[in-house]
Image: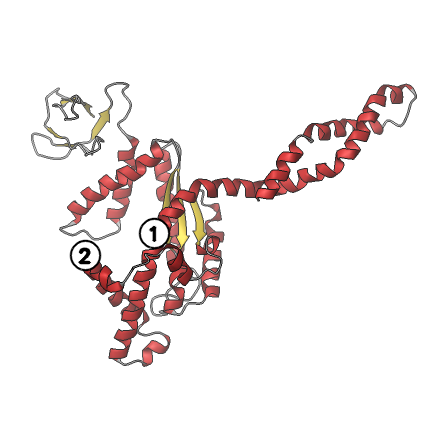
Amino acid sequence: MVLVELKNQENGAMLPVELKNQENEAMLPVELKNQENGAMLPVELKNQENEAMLPVELKNQENGAMLPVELKIVKILEDKLLSIRQTSQNDSLCIENGRNELLKQIQRFTEQNEPIQFILPGFPFKSPNLEKVTGKLPDGADLYALEDLNGLCREISLTYGHGCKMLIWSDGRVFSDLVGVSNEDVSTYNDILKSYSSTMAHIQWDDMSNYISNENADDLIKMYGTKTFTFEHWLSTSENNHKEYIHLRTFLERDLGNTGAYKELSRRKLKGQISHIAREMIHRNDALTRFLPFLDSLIPLVTLLRFLDFLIPLTRFLLFLDFLIPLVTLLRFLDFLIPLVTLLHFPDFLIPLVTLLRFLDFLIPLVPLLRFLDYMI
């Protein structure tokens, strides 16, 4: 293990680092990177003999604790993402910029000692292309993906004591009509996945039906979309937008080209239909992108309402106490009579009943509170 002592100047610049090799006490060179916000990026430690990377344990000078847990979380996410995608020459730049942004997002939660909450738009429905899927219902790929996401959150939770949750925002109803998938198929698909993931401690679900009464993509656009959005303007604002459009159009042509009525279309008409669908998807995605930060702000409220939902059975029971208040008043009088009841050898069964009503009497002050909770629910 190589121990690193970090020193920080008053102006935020990093001073030379003292490195000690436990085997020979020799000093080793180290490359330190400092973010704009002051958080330390991972340290690259090189062995003088063969330039091989060595493991480094970073310790805080003040209390000896490990350096920010945010970096560990980012490392977990980077390792996961890079293990499932091909790399390219631009990856180093993307990773560097993405790491900075990800650290800021993670710090929002760690600074408040709150569970880290991810929102993942996905799991809409099965592709209508039967050359790619076995049917309309979830298959092994869906189940494996959920297990993998839950495992990722579990790994983060082992590093960060306040835990990690993955809110899957199923976006099926945002796009389903564009590709010929019915709302019934969307609901069945999601219900099965929710049932399967019910034992996964880190997975939660949400969708448009909880926020837009008609579950209509047009309403989503009206409520959250850019009022002045035009596809032409969107396309011209960035070269990446143009690449995204081409990629989406190519994907849709491969996915839908051999399904339903599309099989009967000429090449020219098919391309026209696919282009229209791709443009509409991009328009709806603009609204969805603006909606999700709003959803993020609602997470504390959603958590509260889930707690209130848990209270519904208890609320219904305790409101029954409201009905019992006159009876409790009567039993108070009986409570007063207990010595007399005992003295005169009245039926003994009255005494346990009075004891029960003493407990109910204790709960009476809760009735107004539970009325309020019942109203809120």
On-image quarter of the N terminus: top left
Q: Which residue is mark 2?
A: 238
Image coordinates for residue 247, horizontal then vertical, percent: 23, 63
Q: Amino acid at mark 1?
A: Arg
Asked which colour scheme the image uses, the reply is secondary structure
Spatial CA distance of label 1 from label 2 is 18 Å
Q: Amino acid at mark 2?
A: Ser
Graded by Cα atoms within 10 Å as few (under 14), some (14 to 19) or many (20 or more), the crowding at tag 1 reads: some
On-image quarter of the C terminus: top right
Q: Which residue is mark 1?
A: 290
Q: Residue at x 12, y 20 (%)?
A: 24
Q: In the figure, residue 267 lies in which quadrant?
A: bottom left
Q: Residue furthest right?
A: 344
Would you say residue 74 is visible in this rendering? no
In this figure, what is the number of numbered marks? 2
In the rendered structure, the answer to whether residue 145 lies left or right of residue 26 reads right
In the image, residue 203 sits, relative to residue 22, either above or below, namely below
